Image (cartoon, rainbow, N blue to C red):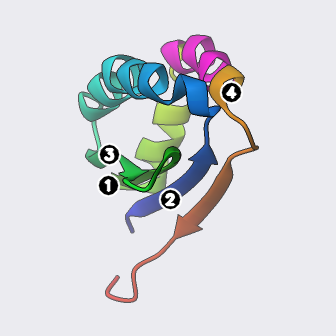
Amino acid sequence: MKARLLVELDVKPDEADAFVDMFRTEFMTRSRSEDGCEQYELWQDPKAPEKMTIVEVWSSQAALDTHLAQDWFGVWAPKMEAAQATPLVVRQLVSVED
């Protein structure tokens, strides 16, 4: 069964552009190259650019677990957290079609 995550976050408004650049370079590029990554995107609210959603689809829970255990994740996650205005809201979802 696939593992799907929706991660909602608000970043500090003055850091939105820098956050997007960092996320593209560090998170999207690396995550998309991992085995089992089927989708890894950052969505941004056009009317409130500090409101963002990360959409992740992994081929399995094991692939997601491996992703979360990557060494680089431990280095970059604190940088992501420093830009956040509010805590992450993480929702793990299953498809009704699975």
Identified at 48% across, 25% down, the residue is 19
- Mark number displayed over residue 41: 3
Q: Secondary structure at mark 3?
A: strand
Q: Are marks 3 and 4 in contact (CB under 8 Å)?
A: no
Under tag 1, what secondary structure? loop
State how far apart marks 2 and 3 are (Cα).
Answer: 10 Å
> How far apart in space, not on screen, are marks 2 and 1 (Cα)?
15 Å
Amino acid type, callout 3: Glu
Residue indicated by mark 1: 59
Q: Quadrant of the N terminus?
A: bottom left
Q: Where is residue 8 shown, x and y percent of the image?
A: 58, 54
Q: Nearer the viewer, mark 4 or mark 2?
A: 4
Residue 73 drawn in magenta: yes
Q: Amino acid at mark 1?
A: Ser
Report the mark closest to the observer, 1 or 4: 4
Q: Earlier in the sequence, mark 3 or mark 1?
A: 3
Are the two marked residues, 2 and 1, in contact with CB atoms closer than 8 angstroms? no
Q: Is residue 35 left or right of residue 83?
A: left
Nearest to viewer (mark 3 / mark 1): 3
* Principal secondary structure, stretch drawn in magenta: helix
Q: Quadrant of the C terminus?
A: bottom left
The circle drawn on residue 81 is: 4
Q: CA distance from mark 3 to mark 4?
A: 18 Å
Element type at mark 4 = helix
* Res 25 → quadrant: top left
Mark 2: amino acid: Leu
Provide the residue span drawn in magenta. 72-81
Q: Is residue 25 visible?
A: yes
Camera-nearest residue between 35 and 30: 30
Which residue matches tag 2?
6
Q: Specify which label sits upstream in the sequence, 4 or 2.
A: 2
Q: Which three-letter amino acid code belongs to the residue tagged 4?
A: Glu
